[in-house]
Image (cartoon, grey):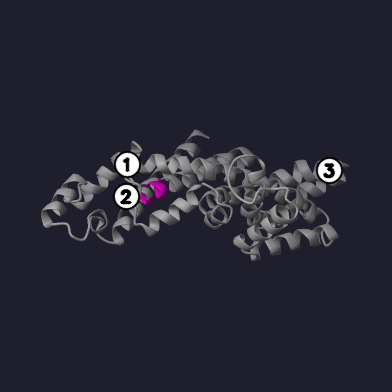
Amino acid sequence: MGKYILKRLGQAIFTLFAMSIIVFFLARLSGDPADTLLPAEATQEHRDRMMALWGLDRPTHIQYFLFVGNAVRGDFGESLRLPGRDAFNLVMVRMSKTAELALVAMLFAILLALVIGVFSAVYKNSPLDFFGKLIAILGQSLPHFWIGIVLIWIFAVNLRILPTSGYGTWKHFVMPAIVVGWFQVAALMRLVRSAMFEALDSEYVQLARVKGVSPMKVIWKHCFRNALIPPLTYAGIMLGYLVVGSITTEIVFSWPGVGVLVLQSVLARDYAVVQAISIVFGTIIIAVNFLVDILYAFIDPRIRYH
């Protein structure tokens, strides 16, 4: 077990290192940072002084190691769009709001997808199975912004039971969490349904039924646990998507998260904030996938043995 964890930890560190290289060089592919930092009327003397101040006059590999050293300390410099504001702190303040929305949406998606997926597989070709397929089709075909606008029109404008936008009480989470999580409900439910089909047809389930084990025990103890591997894999990817892919939802509901900050920083070529967001997002996704790999070993002992 320890060897398995160390191997996965080494892979995670290597992936983080590769991601830092990509983030560092991609930020420079969009142009010379000096063109953004200096006004058009700046002299060559001002340009050379700024290049020396930011270390841009040094060799590229030295710049990279300085970038990594500062990133480890959480120092990405000041925001160019908002002078005086630390880029990392700016990202983390917004990230907390996005993380709250992502966790609520993930909880909604997992609970609904597991229940619908399991019963859709157990009662194949029933009205419940048809309902599950309908949820999957609608969740993967309807645009996020359209779902958000429809929910606002129904629950905020007509029924007046939920706020239209903003952040504050639990009511502010309801519509954004449904919008963000619905697509994941569809994808996760299909995985659970397919994995349950395989588990229901396995020999150990047939043996349990022959022994007279109760149907509910067969479904939830013998089938459900062994069908968790594919959904668990997607759950790790899903958390990263929920954190990263909520830009349109945050715009529709005026959610004070990092999604709007990403759009604003890219348009303003705010290198410090863009790099901070990329590193933070990448670290979250790598850490989640590392934890998923560890959970594999507890769910299925064959993984840690091999």
Name the side, left or right, on which 107 lies relative to 5.
right
State whether residue 24 appears in this view: yes
Label 1, secondary structure: give it: loop
Identified at 34% across, 38% down, the residue is 72
Nearer-the-camera pick, 1 or 34: 34
Instruction: Where is residue 201? Give x, y as percent.
Output: 77, 54
Q: Are marks 2 and 3 in contact (CB under 8 Å)?
A: no
- Quarter in which the C terminus is drawn: top right
Q: Is residue 65 above or below residue 45?
A: above
Q: Are marks 1 and 3 in contact (CB under 8 Å)?
A: no
Q: Main secondary structure of the magenta part?
A: helix
Residue stretch in magenta: 274-279
Q: Which residue is mark 1?
A: 84
Q: Quadrant of residue 26?
A: bottom left
The label shown at residue 216 is 3
> What is the CA distance from the residue labelled 1 to the residue labelled 3?
60 Å
Q: Earlier in the sequence, mark 2 or mark 3?
A: 2
Nearer-the-camera pick, 116 or 259: 259
Specify the amino acid type for callout 2: Leu
Q: Which residue is mark 2?
A: 80
> What is the CA distance from the residue labelled 2 to the residue labelled 1?
9 Å
> What is the CA distance from the residue labelled 2 to the residue labelled 3?
59 Å
